[in-house]
Image (spheres, grey):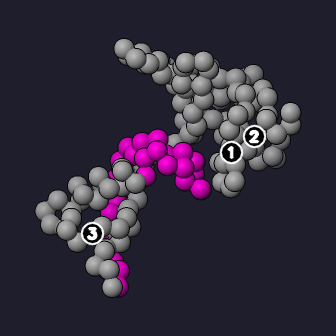
Amino acid sequence: MQLHPRHFGRNLRENLVSDLMKDAEGTCSGRHGFVVAITGIENIGKGLIRDGTGFVTFPVKYQCVMGFFAEAGPVQFFVSNHLIPDDMEFQSGDMPNYTTSDGSVKIQKDSEVRLKIIGTRVDATEIFCIGTTKDDFLGVINDPTTT
């Protein structure tokens, strides 16, 4: 994380965490997948001053919730990395996806996926569900690249 000198002082840690959440949550990491939420900070290393700018770069190690989103009609589902089969890994590139080690099954944008609902949240304006593809007869039912 890079931090401007105006954020130094007593609240240095809070400013770093706040900037990390703004910068990382809701992004797609090329190595790991979609970062939904940061759940904890493991370590903030010593800062390194960037020559000529005054900014300081801090190495930050954090824990987060990652996975993919799906939708069925008006309902949105989230499937966490922990609820995706263990033999599937996130692949970055032009079309980010989760792929089995042998490459035979791929979950990507516009894939049709069968999942099981394991949790729901309903409020006045939306319904949101947690799903899993980590069970028998669940997963990709239609791959958009083969149609």
Q: Which residue is mark 3?
A: 4
* Element assignment for label 1: strand
Residue 83 image point, x, y percent: 58, 32
- Viewer-closest of 123 and 46: 123
| Picture residue at 32% right of the left edge, 56% below the top | 19
Q: Which residue is mark 2?
A: 106
Q: Nearer the viewer, mark 3 or mark 2?
A: 3
Per the model, the C-alpha gap separating discs 3 and 2 is: 41 Å
Residue reaching furthest left? 10
Q: Earlier in the sequence, mark 2 or mark 1?
A: 1
In which quadrant will I find the N terminus?
Answer: bottom left
Residue 36 image point, x, y percent: 46, 41
Q: Earlier in the sequence, mark 3 or mark 2?
A: 3
Residue 13 seen in the current view = yes
Per the model, the C-alpha gap separating discs 2 and 1 is: 7 Å
Q: Dots 3 and 2: beta carbons under 8 Å?
A: no
Q: Which dot marks residue 97?
A: 1
Residue 109 image point, x, y percent: 68, 38
Q: Few, some or many C-alpha atoms within 10 Å of disc 2 (few <14, some 14-19, many ≥20)?
A: many
| Picture residue at 32% right of the left edge, 80% below the top | 53
Q: Few, some or many C-alpha atoms within 10 Å of disc 3 (few <14, some 14-19, many ≥20)?
A: few
Per the model, the C-alpha gap separating discs 1 and 3 is: 35 Å
Q: Dots 1 and 3: beta carbons under 8 Å?
A: no
Q: Dots 2 and 1: beta carbons under 8 Å?
A: yes
Q: Earlier in the sequence, mark 1 or mark 3?
A: 3
Q: Magenta residues?
A: 24-51
Q: Few, some or many C-alpha atoms within 10 Å of disc 1 (few <14, some 14-19, many ≥20)?
A: some
Q: Nearer the viewer, mark 1 or mark 3?
A: 3
| Picture residue at 36% right of the left edge, 14% below the top | 124
* Element assignment for label 3: loop
Quarter where residue 117 is shown: top right
Question: Going by the image, does 41 lie left or right of 31?
Answer: left
